[in-house]
Amino acid sequence: MSDPNPVIVCPACDLLIERKLLPLGRHAHCPRCHQHLYGRYAFRPSQLMALTITGFLLLPSAFFEPLIYLRLAGVNSDANLLKGIMVLLFEHEIWVAGLVFWCAVLAPVGLLLGIFALASGLAKRWHILAPTLQAVEVFRHWAMLEVYIVSLLVALFKLVDIADVRLGGGLLSLGILMLLNLTLLILFDPAPYWERVPLEEPDHVPDQRP
């Protein structure tokens, strides 16, 4: 089965381009503006599994460890990713809290789980190869840890004038997790996995025993 998205849009000039399977180590560029579109890397499944397992090990620290420590008006406090989402919920910012939870928690974790299932062969063994590929395609567009980190740094620069701010270990783990997710987005090529999806399910052969 071929890639379900045979036509892609150039992010620089919006030109519609037919996506083709490239030889290993080759890259595709826009014929109009020469923007890099995608490439095919000789990345083995074992290497993808190593990256995803590293990501799983980083998740507890990135989500639960404090990102920053604050001392404001003599009061000490800290903030982590999940605590920030809970604060938004308590402030009745339900849509914002849901968006942050989706883009900074569910989508990155789903991306790790999906690529791990593909690289390890679990998706093929459980006969969920096509749904897993479709889920990874969704998660790769919504995993936005870098947006969250940039927003956090902007808030941090505003706080340094009014509070004593120290960085926590969770911020380092979150930054490494962001770089790891970006690496997976660049190196993961779904085309070889789409080729393994059968065009149709085999017909059931009825029992013809007398």
Image (cartoon, rainbow, N blue to C red):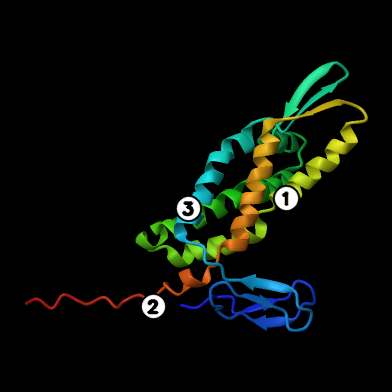
Lower position in the chain sequence, tag 1 or tag 2: 1
Q: Viewed as shown, does residue 67 lie left or right of 105? A: right
* Disc 1 element: helix
Residue identifier under label 1: 146
Are circles 1 and 3 on residues that touch, CB within 8 Å?
no
Q: Viewed as shown, does residue 164 lie left or right of 82? A: right
In the rendered image, residue 202, in percent from the top left (x then y), is placed at: 31, 76
Residue identifier under label 3: 49
User: Distance of mark 1 from mark 2, alpha carbons?
Assistant: 39 Å
Foreground mark, 1 or 2, reads 1
In the rendered image, residue 137, in percent from the top left (x then y), is placed at: 58, 64
* Residue shown at 56% from the left, 78% from the top: 22
Q: Is residue 71 above or below residue 26?
A: above
In the rendered image, residue 61, in percent from the top left (x then y), is placed at: 61, 34
**Residue type indicated by callout 2:** Glu
**Residue type indicated by callout 1:** Glu
Lower position in the chain sequence, tag 3 or tag 2: 3
* Disc 2 element: loop
**Image quarter hosting the C terminus:** bottom left
* Residue shown at 53% from the left, 40% from the top: 57
Are circles 3 and 2 on residues that touch, CB within 8 Å?
no
**Residue type indicated by callout 3:** Met
* Residue shown at 39% from the left, 75% from the top: 198
State the residue in front, 123 or 179.
179
Residue identifier under label 2: 200
Q: Viewed as shown, does residue 200 lie left or right of 95? A: left
Q: For the residue carrying disc 2, how many other residues have a C-alpha within 10 Å: few (<14), some (14-19), or many (20+)?
A: few
* Residue shown at 62% from the left, 33% from the top: 64
